Amino acid sequence: MMSPRILLSGASGQLGLCLIERAAALGVDLISLDRAALDITDRNAMTHALTVHNPDFFINAAAYTKVDHAEQSAGKNREQAFAVNATGVANVAAACAAQNVALIHLSTDYVFAGQARHPYTETDSPSPQGVYAASKLAGEKACVEQGGRHLIIRTGWLYSEHGHNFLKTMLRLAITKKRIAVVADQYGCPTYAGDLAAAILQICIQGRIGPAVGGLYHYAGPTVCSWSEFARIIFRQAQAQGQLAHCPQVMDISSANYAAAAPRPAYSALNSTKFQHTFGIKIPPLKESLNAALYALRHQNEN
Ligand SMILES: NC(=O)c1ccc[n+]([C@@H]2O[C@H](COP(=O)([O-])OP(=O)(O)OC[C@H]3O[C@@H](n4cnc5c(N)ncnc54)[C@H](OP(=O)(O)O)[C@@H]3O)[C@@H](O)[C@H]2O)c1
């Protein structure tokens, strides 16, 4: 398939914006729909969108991603999280299966309990600890149950020049603070959303989603570190690039002292070997990806 037609939901989110930019750079035919244009909780709207645009692939980047918020308001937010991440995904998967559109759906490293000491593989058993994580696992199950051609890509710790993320928060805090307290007892794989977007588009260009190449994959950056280690790496690299006048001191704190509403896995590193081997796509090293994100941020600020 030389020039696939792709329909994207969640277009104004972090990954959605990266997909739009990368598709434009690659000359890929991507139609992007934000929540106002397509609410995935509306089953008829989902079916209608596929009928109107007739895509080869549907990328579902839409999600309820407020991890802490999902735990609050006596179950009301839990309902919202499941409405989007479980029922909404079931709508997406059902419509794609009915119209034979290959679905690429995103899930999360938070489906794991976090007791492992090796990066999780696709065969490790999930055991979600919070509402967001449970709703995302329910979405994965919905994709499988609908029986259409699909890829589920679990990722984690996304950062980029777009949306809200750890990289942007750290750079913002660094302008005003000499010392920053960062959680040191949660480990994961920082993943550049720009790399993930490029990889997803590459899969669409390859056009191979079917019985032989389908199902569950992990995609995450190759470095395993804690949030506080990631903060130090960010500051060192931003300073080396001349984007920070000084490196703030990073103070290690425990998750217990951070007091987030949602439990998070202590360890949620993902093993991406299956993804890289199946699709022939190499995930770049952290330093290279972080440089790309920092460069894009500097470019944004200059314009
Ligand atoms: N960010 C991470 O670190 C991370 C880690 C692991 C996995 N993931 C997964 O990766 C995917 C992309 O994440 P992201 O960082 O790009 O998230 P994001 O920035 O929060 O974007 C999610 C988008 O989904 C939209 N949305 C929410 N409810 C919707 C609905 N009912 N119908 C249509 N659109 C809806 C949101 O629109 P509004 O802005 O209007 O609310 C938002 O634009 C998600 O599946 C997420 O679970 C993310």
Image: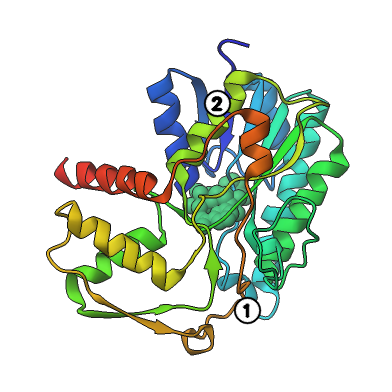
Of labels 2 and 1, earlier in sequence is 1
Q: Secondary structure at mark 2?
A: helix
Q: Is residue 203 above or below residue 238?
A: above
Location of the C terminus by quadrant is top left
Between 63 and 115, the residue placed more toward the observer is 115
Between 210 and 229, the residue placed more toward the observer is 229
- Location of residue 120 in the rendering, given as x and y in whole percent from the top left corner: 69, 58
Label 1 within 8 A of ligand 1 by Cβ: no
Work out how far the residue at label 2 is from the one at label 1, CA to CA, in angstroms: 41 Å
Residue type at tag 2: Gln
Q: Name which residue lies at 45% across and 41% down.
A: 284
Quarter of the view holding residue 253:
bottom left
User: Which residue carries the number 2 mark?
Assistant: 202
Res. 288 in view: yes
Q: Is residue 53 above or below residue 185?
A: above
- Location of residue 216 in the rendering, given as x and y in whole percent from the top left corner: 74, 43
Location of the N terminus by quadrant is top right
Left or right relative to 240: residue 27:
right
Residue type at tag 1: Ser
Q: Name which residue lies at 26% across and 56% down.
A: 237
Q: Name which residue lies at 38% across and 45% down.
A: 289
Work out which residue is located at the far front of the displayed protein and give it.
Answer: 118
Res. 80 in view: no
Q: Secondary structure at mark 1?
A: loop
- Location of residue 150 in the rendering, given as x and y in whole percent from the top left corner: 75, 34
Classed neighbour count for the residue bearing mark 1: other residues with Cα under 10 Å, few (<14), some (14–19), many (≥20): few
Classed neighbour count for the residue bearing mark 2: other residues with Cα under 10 Å, few (<14), some (14–19), many (≥20): some
User: Which residue carries the number 1 mark?
Assistant: 73
Between 33 and 248, the residue placed more toward the observer is 248
Left or right relative to 114: residue 293:
left
